[in-house]
Image (cartoon, rainbow, N blue to C red):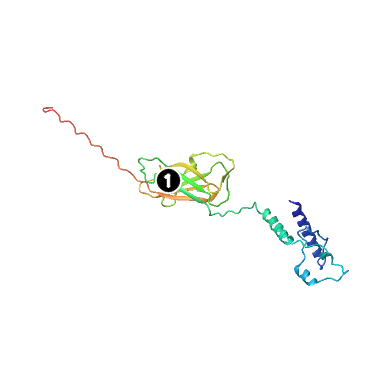
């Protein structure tokens, strides 16, 4: 804290204390002309008129006017609270964009045992995003059938460390996770919902749908049995 700011706070505290004890406006001391609190009202100067010779001026008018005092005091007061709250950041919760892609978009269960999942979170807030996680797991991927029943959970086949972690996303940057999920519980012709989310951060959730198909196997031509020799 600068000396000027400290002086301002001390003077403000003194004035408030004095006002609480006395109805009259106290002046604890007469500031010098460089003080930002030395202000002579314009009405006082205009109404005073010419003084008679030998007439003494009041204590407040015995000092020259600091024309920039009022501006400096306002800037000091505003700057103090501006600096105090400069480090406080309020981030809108719905100002980021997430994207979920499943590849291939069309696939056959006879040909694919797994499908690729690409989950991306973009920071569009203009400020740094801090994401906290209770364990080493960062994302979760779920697959639900048409009735909403969970048939596949990505984390079931993986182990995570019980260590909290933090991920930071700078403005206009992104984080991306590329994983795979099994198709063993899927049926051809049924539409499934794939959901990806950041663990402990439910506001970053995205869903998409897939409908696998079944490719009929080609029927192989059966060989014609050879004719038996006559007489056998």
Q: Quadrant of residue 163?
A: top right
Residue 202 vs 37, above or below: the answer is above
Measuring from the top left, give residue 53's x and y in whole percent: 87, 70
Tag 1 residue:
102
Measuring from the top left, give residue 118's x and y in whole percent: 46, 44
Q: Residues within 10 Å of mark 1 (few under 14, many from 20)?
A: many
Q: How many marks?
A: 1
Residue at 78 percent of width and 72 percent of height? 47
Measuring from the top left, give residue 12's x and y in whole percent: 77, 59
Residue at 77 percent of width and 55 percent of height? 7
Measuring from the top left, give residue 18's x and y in whole percent: 81, 63
Residue farthest right in this picture: 54
Residue 97 vs 53, above or below: the answer is above
Of residues 96 and 145, the one nearer the viewer is 96
Q: Quadrant of residue 64?
A: bottom right
Residue at 46 percent of width and 41 percent of height? 179
Residue at 69 percent of width and 56 percent of height? 79
Of residues 84 and 155, the one nearer the viewer is 84
């Amino acid at each position: 804290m600068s000396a000027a700011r400290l002086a301002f706070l001390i003077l403000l505290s003194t004035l408030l204390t004095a006002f609480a004890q006395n109805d009259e406006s106290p002046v604890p001391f007469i500031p010098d002309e460089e003080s930002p609190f030395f202000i002579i009202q314009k009405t006082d100067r205009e109404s005073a008129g010419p003084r008679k010779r030998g007439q003494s001026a009041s204590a407040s008018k015995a000092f020259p006017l600091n024309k920039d005092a009022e501006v400096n005091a306002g800037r000091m007061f505003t700057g103090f609270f501006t600096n105090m709250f400069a480090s406080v950041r309020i981030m809108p919760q719905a100002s980021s964009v997430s994207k979920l892609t499943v590849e291939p978009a069309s696939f056959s269960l006879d040909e694919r045992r797994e499908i690729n999942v690409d989950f991306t979170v973009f920071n569009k807030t203009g400020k740094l995003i801090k994401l906290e996680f209770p364990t080493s797991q960062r994302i979760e991927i779920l697959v639900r059938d048409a009735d909403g029943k969970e048939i596949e959970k990505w984390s079931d086949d993986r182990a995570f460390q019980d260590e909290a972690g933090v991920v930071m996303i700078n403005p206009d940057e992104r984080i991306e996770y590329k994983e795979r999920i099994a198709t063993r519980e899927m049926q051809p012709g049924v539409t499934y919902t794939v959901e990806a989310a950041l663990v402990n951060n439910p506001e970053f959730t995205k869903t998409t749908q897939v409908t696998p198909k079944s490719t009929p196997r080609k029927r192989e031509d059966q060989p014609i049995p050879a004719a038996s020799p006559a007489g056998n």
